[in-house]
Amino acid sequence: MGIKKQGKIPRFRRIWIISVCCSVLLWPDLGLAAGPRPLKPTQTEPRVWYGNSETVSFKRALGGSESLTAEEEKRIKDMAPPKDYDRPYIRYNIAIGRKNLSGIINLSNSSYAQVNATVAEGSVRNNQRNTLMAVGYDWNPGRFDLEYVWTKSFTYSANPVFDPATTNPSGTVMTLNALISNKVLLGNFYWDYRDFGEHIYPYMLVSAGGVYNTVQTALTNPQSARLTPTTHNFSWALGWGAGLRLGVIKGLFLDVHFRYLKAGHINFRPEYSMYLRGNHSFYWYGLGFMYLL
């Protein structure tokens, strides 16, 4: 018996087989076009992280969610570079400048023998080296800090105290030496200009605060020498300045500035009826560091 030779598949059957295969492959819920299977209600989709581009609007467009979870917010915050504002800071400066005592006038009581005499040494200047410490907060572009200024004591000498041409001849020629020290507490408001480059911030500032003055005097005449009572007085202070902050490393800035401070008046009362007053001001150039906490 011979083997029956197989013939070709009929044309109609071939067309039917091809159509079924294409349907299986291209049907939306089957085959290659199906894509990811929808999750069952009990399943959770694995978290996919899209980096800094994942914002609320991005997430809404991607998955329909209206807000980020607390965990997502934290991850975005951790990925973002640290800000150099909206942070507290500390500042330390060493300053070199000059302290001025000017316009010293005689305000003695009417019972004083030299009540109408003119002060011979009406002004004095003294080089200064000060130390500044401050704590504050930067909220961009404004800043505020509370600052304490350690100032070097300086001396005032007048020999004689009063101009001989204006003194009462019956009065005694006297010499006055005084040691003056100050305690300065200031509140400073700054305005930073952040358009000059990254971590290069010029700034302007205004200052307001108080100065507590201590004056130790020694009043002498040819016949005697005596220490006189120490006097204290408080005066208001107003000032202004300008400076520049330069970023050094993360969170640390180099700070250079110029400051001027009008520090009110200083009182001298060597004797009960003798009273002198002078205007007090100083300026300095400061160099130091500012560190963001």
Image: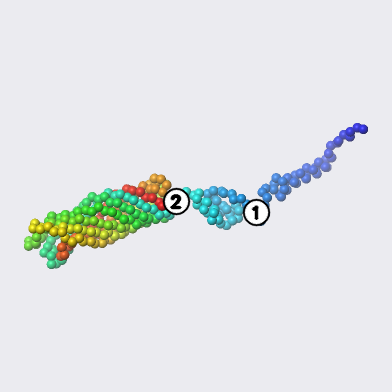
Kindly indicate whether the residue at mark 2 contacts the one at mark 1 (C-beta within 8 angstroms): no
Which quadrant holds residue 144? bottom left
Residue at 56%, 48% in the rendered image: 50
Q: Secondary structure at mark 2?
A: loop
Percent of width and height locating residue 12? 83, 42
Q: Residue furthest top?
A: 2
Which quadrant holds residue 232? bottom left
Percent of width and height locating residue 205? 34, 54
Residue placed under numbered mark 2 in the picture = 83
Of the numbered discs in the image, which one, if any, rests on residue 43? 1
Identified by mark 1, the residue type is Gln
Quadrant occupied by the N terminus: top right
Instruction: Please tell me which residue lies in front, 141 or 49.
Output: 49
Check disc 1: other Cα within 10 Å, few if <14, some if 14-19, many if 20+. Answer: few
Q: Is residue 46 left or right of residue 211?
A: right
Is residue 80 shown above or below 166? above
Which quadrant holds residue 225? bottom left
